[in-house]
Amino acid sequence: RTALRARLVQGLGGTARDPESAEKARELVLSELAKPGSVTPTLLNAAVPIAALGGDAALYEKYLERSRKASAPEEHDRYMYALAGFSDPALVRRTMEYVLGPEVRGQDAKLFLARMISNRDIRGLAWELTQSRWDEIQKKTGDSFGTGLIVGALGAFCDATRLGEIQRFFQAHPVADAERPLTQTMERISECAARSETQGPKLVEWLN
């Protein structure tokens, strides 16, 4: 029941962006931040990233502070990775600086960037920043596996314009051993774009 409740909260607040669920998640997180241990870890794991989705700079600071002071790796990661959920453009840019700074390890940076790109609210900006900071990202992550995670996350795009843009970027910036993830990403975007074009109008008509 505890696990099911957390999955339901994630589905409503994270996937469906239900306002009431998001507000409740924020209440839970603020309660936990004020009194550690007041929310069960399973529910907290779902609530923390949801609260970040519409979070402001004040909440961002609380997450950053809690991650820095965390004594347990799980708590550190819970709040650190949730920074990828904040959608304010200024905070997105701040997160990119944080990811490429000394506090974030290279092995965490690739996962962090993949999460930013996977976030539909900031995907476009995250990809733009990734392109502009590509050399730093390559130096930070240091291996093709890290690049593969980032390339794989780009598969969440769903339009032909992005498909061509991504293809051109990696033609100009080839990455060794990342050909397979790139091919899979191109296929996912292409299939999604085609499906959206053919089925999107039908879905809108049905919903209306």
Image: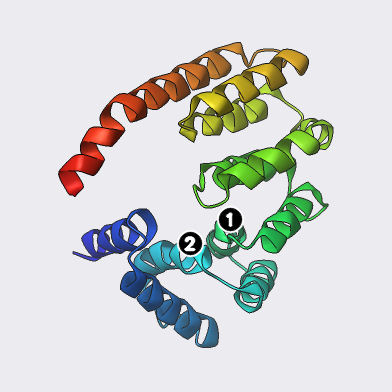
Position of 60 relative to 159 (above/below) = below
Q: Residue at x 39, y 26 (%)?
A: 192
Q: Amino acid at mark 1?
A: Tyr
Side of 39 where 178 appears, left or right: right
Looking at the rendering, which quadrant does residue 59 occupy? bottom right
Position of 179 relative to 29 (above/below) = above
Residue behind mark 1: 81
Find residue 71 and report its horizontal and vertical position in percent. 62, 69
Q: Residue at x 61, y 12 (%)?
A: 179
Find residue 56 and report its horizontal and vertical position in percent. 60, 73
Q: Secondary structure at mark 1?
A: helix
Residue behind mark 2: 49
Whole-number angstrom distance, CA of label 2 to CA of label 1: 8 Å
Q: Earlier in the sequence, mark 2 or mark 1?
A: 2
Q: Residue furthest bottom?
A: 34
Side of 176 where 51 appears, left or right: left
Circles 2 and 1: CB atoms closer than 8 Å: yes
Mark 2 nearby-residue class (10 Å; few <14, some 14–19, many ≥20): many
Q: Is residue 107 among the parts visible in the rendering? A: no
Position of 70 relative to 147 (above/below) = below
Closer to us: 200 or 15 = 200
Q: Secondary structure at mark 2?
A: helix
Closer to us: 135 or 195 = 195
Looking at the rendering, which quadrant does residue 11 occupy? bottom left
Position of 180 relative to 194 (above/below) = above
